[in-house]
Image (spheres, rainbow, N blue to C red):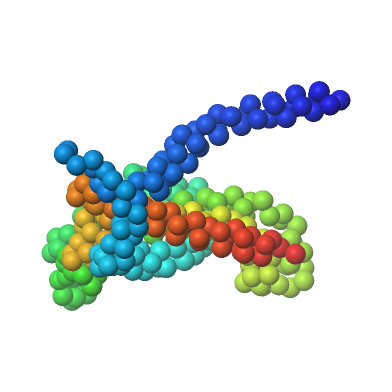
Amino acid sequence: MKRWRIARQINGWLFLLPAIAFLTLFTYWPALKTLVEGFYSTARPRRPAHFIGIDQYRQLIDDPVFWQALSNNAWYALVSIPVATGIALVMAIWVNDRVPGRALARMAYFTPTVLPMIAVANIWLFFYTPQYGLLEQVVSIFGGPPHNWLGSSSSALAAVTIVAIWKEAGFFMIFYLAALQQISPVLAEAAALEGASRWQFFRRVQFPLLMPTTLFVLINAIINAFRTVDHIIVMTRGGPDNSTMLLLYYVYQVGFSFWDTGYAAALTMVLLALLAAVSLVQYGWLDRRVHYR
């Protein structure tokens, strides 16, 4: 019996070994190396890297572009996450019902998800083109003044946020749709017999049962809000005047445009710390409050 238990445990670890190896090689080791590199200066052709302690992090505190990027990313996340999640939930409820053209609606909602972000950014560049873009044509019909949506600091961040919402809402819809289809139809029948309205059924039954899915969607949405930079590279490159500079794009710019890998490593660790803190709050606090009782 004891040998059988040991053999079973060994088999279990052998099954986990490939996943552990890939996680260690491509996640934990790069993160550890980045942490160490943040305490060293950037190596140059005639000047090897040397230990400088927390100087990179002191530089970060005094860096106005970092604080601008952090502020932009916070605004980007606070707007895109609830809006994309809310739209995804509404779309999932809509296409979950037996409405005419349900399959076509599902396909239309999900189509932006399968498009590469580079392609999406180029599509929206056409929408935002000054004077000739689709958005400008619609605004001109109603007598609105022309506006450079991506060239103005007042509207550039909102413009790229709308692109992210359009891209991600269909992706989150799939999770909500799958969760809705797992809810027993008996609950809807019981609610109808009790005289509950459509809104009451959603608020009292469906939404509480969807809370675990909502937690999963929120975690993915937060990660996406801090890691998506493809459309920033294509549409604005952080401009104008750093108004669309996001943290990950700033890391990319510092590391691959300015070739300051030490400072880029310090920025990366700040970004990882922020994501880890948010994940701990979500899993440690929200996870115990999302299950329907």
Foreground of the two, 140 or 17: 17
Residue 3 visible in rendering: yes
Residue 120 is left or right of residue 214, and the answer is left
Foreground of the two, 288 or 170: 288
Total numbered badges shown on the rendered structure: 0
Residue sitting at x 55%, y 29%: 18
Residue 247 is left or right of residue 20, and the answer is left
Residue sitting at x 16%, y 75%: 145
Residue 91 visible in rendering: no
Considering only vertical position in the picture, is 92 above or below 1?
A: below
Residue 196 is left or right of residue 283, and the answer is right
* Quarter of the figure that contains the C terminus: bottom right
Q: Position of residue 119 (x, y in %)?
A: 28, 46
Residue sitting at x 65%, y 30%: 13
Q: Residue furthest left?
A: 131
Q: Position of residue 85 (x, y in %)?
A: 49, 61
Q: Position of residue 183 (x, y in %)?
A: 68, 55
* Quarter of the figure that contains the N terminus: top right
Residue sitting at x 49%, y 56%: 276
Residue 196 is left or right of residue 84, and the answer is right
Locate residue 49: give its quadrant: top left
Q: Position of residue 245 (x, y in %)?
A: 26, 61
